[in-house]
Amino acid sequence: MICPLLLVMLASGCDNLAKGVTEAVLNMEIKKEDIRKCYIRGRPFEGLEAKLKRQEQLAQTNKGDHPVLKVLVVHGIGSPQPGYSTRLAENLAQALSLNHVQETIKEITITHPTFPDQDLGLLRLTRYMNANKNREMIFAELTWEPIIAKEKQTINFDNSGEYSFRRTHINNTLKVFLNDTIPDVMMFNGTSRQQINVSVSQSLCWLMSEKWESLQIKTAQFCDASAPNRMNQIDDEFVFISHSLGSRITVDALQWIANIFSDISKLDAALAENAQIPQSTAPTALQTNTMSNFLEKRHLLQQKEFMVFMLSNQLPLLQMGQLKPEVTGRIPDICSLKATHAAEKLFSKTHLIAFSDPNDLFSYALPPSFIDEYVDSRLCPTLTNAILNVTSITDIFVGQFANPLAAHTEYDNDPRVIGLIAKGMGHSDIDPGVTEHCTWLESVPDGQ
């Protein structure tokens, strides 16, 4: 029985055999049911589309100047190269019908007088727009990895050909991955934390200070937020998208800014450091004017809403071993409509949307209590969890399996993730794919 079958297969030729196998596999894939889950729970939130619609309406009213959407991307562990977020940017541009892109990409090398000899990262800006140019997104990609690159070289020998050939191939692949990622967390929790916070805050300063047209193609400058001509684009709409360790970095940077703005003595010290003005008991006229300018901008920040989309969120893991923020457990006192200490808040609202895949070994969902206990109340944080499988689940002989590496890296290519960022959740204009494939459970604040 077997011999005649083999003869027939050989007679049919390799091409036909390959074609038959391919068709069989494709048919299996077509018939295979997508069993990936998608569960969203928390506060409703708007997506980037709502912000672009407001921009479009304002552009019709104000033919000249109008606010634009600015998205800041903060990477996580590893050694990403500039351009690492292009797939995410292009997926969002397509979902938002922004089918034009500026040919020129602008770059800002981050600097700060406190760290005069250190590379604090690269901010890479790309401009997406529609044909009418009344819907515009400035996509700003921060690469902070240069801050730690030199120190990571101390373990280069472990990856070198002189030593790595002694490992088995699979073990060497795993060791290279560990050497490229674990040091990032260690250095962020150690000597590089302030520099990374400065890198994020400087990026935000640039976005709040400049229009696309006023930015140079390449520059290396310090953005002094206390200067009169800075932060004059604060009416623009600002969104953060982070991945992995980037979630901790982004929230920490916002809390670091909150500490400076909320404590006058710290604010005075920061101003003196930024402007390189000696501190004294008798403030100069320049210091007085600078303080007045900063307080005015603080008032404007208190009216701003920020969104942080955290892909492969790691806030709970990276909170371990760290001190709590200065102000916690006081969200109702500072942020509610009947708040008795509303003057303490830094932002009107900071909406945290935590994406996690249960098969991603590096991601964590957030319980509501985490926000109250471990996020600075002055940010006025709210929470939504998006728990979904971003990679396929396969049946193998010992049970079901999902590739943990793909589960960690494929968020930016998942249509439901893109749909949630683009269209939001909990209102009428939801992405159809999210409506079809995701379960939504809206959380209601206490007292409502």
Image (cartoon, rainbow, N blue to C red):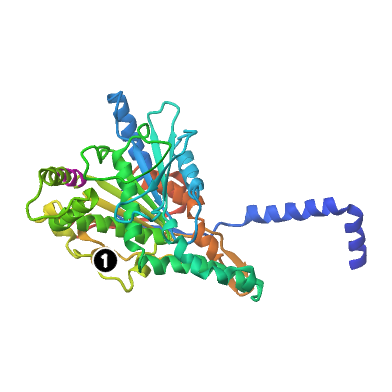
Q: Residue furthest left?
A: 282
Observer-nearest of 329 and 281: 281
Instruction: Find the residue positioned furthest to the top.
Output: 63
**Residue depicted at x 18% and y 59%:** 331
Residues in magenta? Answer: 296-301
Graded by Cα atoms within 10 Å as few (under 14), some (14 to 19) or many (20 or more), the crowding at tag 1 reads some
User: Is 333 drawn above or below residue 299 in the view shown?
Assistant: below
Task: Please name whichever residue, 436 or 266, is drawn nearer the observer in this view of the structure.
Answer: 266
Instruction: Pinpoint residue 322: horizontal percent, then vertical percent.
Output: 30, 71
In front here: 114 or 296?
A: 114
Residue 74, x across and y down, in percent: 40, 53
Within the magenta stretch, is there residue 299? yes
Q: Position of residue 325 (x, y in %)?
A: 23, 65
The quadrant in which residue 297 appears is top left
Image coordinates for residue 248, horizontal then vertical, percent: 35, 61
Determine which residue is flagged by label 1.
Answer: 374
User: Magenta region's main secondary structure?
Assistant: helix
Asked if residue 162 lies left or right of residue 253, the reply is right
* Residue positioned 18% across, 50% down in the render: 277
**Image quadrant in which you'd find residue 2:** bottom right
Quick check: can you spot residue 86? yes
Mark 1 is on which residue type?
Answer: Tyr
Asked whether residue 436 is in view, the answer is no
Numbered disc total: 1
Q: Residue at (51%, 70%) from the top-left corner?
A: 155
The answer to whether 123 appears left or right of 178 in the picture is left
Element carrying mark 1: helix
Quadrant location, the C terminus: bottom left
Please check the rendered image and state whether residue 164 is part of the magenta-colored stretch, yes or no.
no
Q: Is residue 243 above or below residue 100?
A: below
**Nearer to the camera, 47 or 173:** 173
Residue at point 24%, 50% (across, down) = 274
